[in-house]
Amino acid sequence: MNSLRRLGFICVFLVLTGFVLSFFGKPTVIAPVSIVDPSKELNAAEFKGFTDSTFGDKVVNSTWAMVLVHSEFSNANASGLESLRNWAKQKFTLDRQFLSPIVLPSSRASSTVLSSLTNSLFGLPIKLADLVTSSFLKWRIEQFHKSNAYQSFRVDFYELFGANQESVKLLFRYQEERAKESLSVVQSFFFWLVTVTVIGANYFRMLSKNEPSGLRQSLACFWAALATFYLLNACISNSVEVLAGSCLSSIIAIYLAFPIAIERNELGSLTWMKYELSARAQVILLWLTLSLCGIQVINWIKGGILTNPDSITLLVGAFTGNFVHDPIGIKRGIVEAVGMLWLLLTVWTIYFYKSSTDRSQEIETKLKSLGKQKVSIQ
């Protein structure tokens, strides 16, 4: 009864807070955020006053051969310029004026009661997170612009696209778009960094107390966090696929938190019975969970293309400030590391499964033998 009352108080508090925030503020209005400022380069003497009214047509119809200045960054520059040119072709095909857009405030959709409540509760925190993340990205990009890698790319870029106002806007707009795409990726990274740290600390705390259900409870917390993460993303993006992932993760989290079994009683009817998962079952569930995470990371990396970078590429670009080069070496290293860790995890899981004993089955066998002895004595 106390749990139901506590849950009721939480629901009332959330709805009350959401109503107050929606009434006195505008939590769903998103102000435009600028991360990369091209004004300094636009006012440089080598670009000031030089315009090209046919720049968009030239890019769309371009079949330019790349003649790059030979350096240690030549291969990376060639890949980055090809990506930028394909991206620019796609943008100019849709809109010849996309380099001079009219930037207006936007609003998050609130098509359902749940999405309206979520936007009201998390609208302000999301704005603050966007502001902090944008400042971080702006600092990292400014630091990268001082590096030799960017100066080499900059020289090759203007050799290919020409030195004019439009090419400057194109270069900085490209970085701006990539930086904005990485906002949610960086925020998700820190969310999971904190979540996994807290879950790991709690697991080791329970391990020190020799609690046999520590791993199961930690996995339940992980799947509950995943369900919450998917639910917030579904409310913001109005994605049915993400919402379905949230529902499935919630079911897994509930089962891990309150494991049950269906058995037949003496009368032959089905009954629900709560039981504790064995150590073997918990390790198998750990293997399944980490394997699914590994599959997700590998699919991110291998599913990315030049015009639509994957989450790992955006994350690396956010921390390095480099959104013009594809971090092929880093991504290859991540894939190899994930594969090696998964192999070690699989070997350890097989070893644990074969060497450990199923305590729950032992206890059940002992209880049954005690029951038989009791019957025989009577």
Image (cartoon, grey):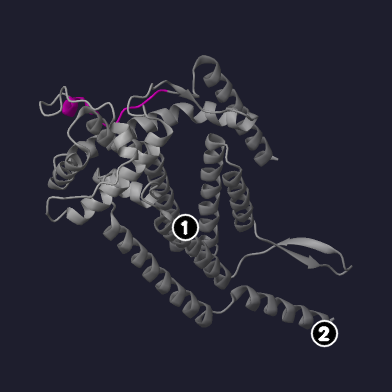
Q: Nearer the viewer, residue 268 or 362?
A: 268
Specify the farthest residue to the right. Answer: 267
- Which residue appears at 78% of the width and 67% of the height? 263
In the shown orientation, is residue 56 left or right of residue 199? left
- Image coordinates for residue 102, horizontal then vertical, percent: 38, 21
Residue drawn at point x = 67 percent, y = 35 percent: 5
Residue 199, image x and y in percent? 45, 53
Callout in the foreground (2, 1): 1
Q: Report the residue that reaches farthest toward the left.
A: 45
- Residues in magenta, as a range: 31-42
Q: Nearer the viewer, residue 50 or 260?
A: 50
Quadrant assignment for the C terminus: bottom right
Query: Is 282 or 135 nearer to us in this picture?
Result: 135
Q: Which residue is mark 2?
A: 376
Up/down of 176 relative to 331, above or below: above
| Main SS of residues in magenta | loop
Q: Is residue 35 magenta?
A: yes
Relative placement, left or right, of 46 versus 63 is left
Q: Amino acid at mark 1?
A: Gln
Res 296 label? 1
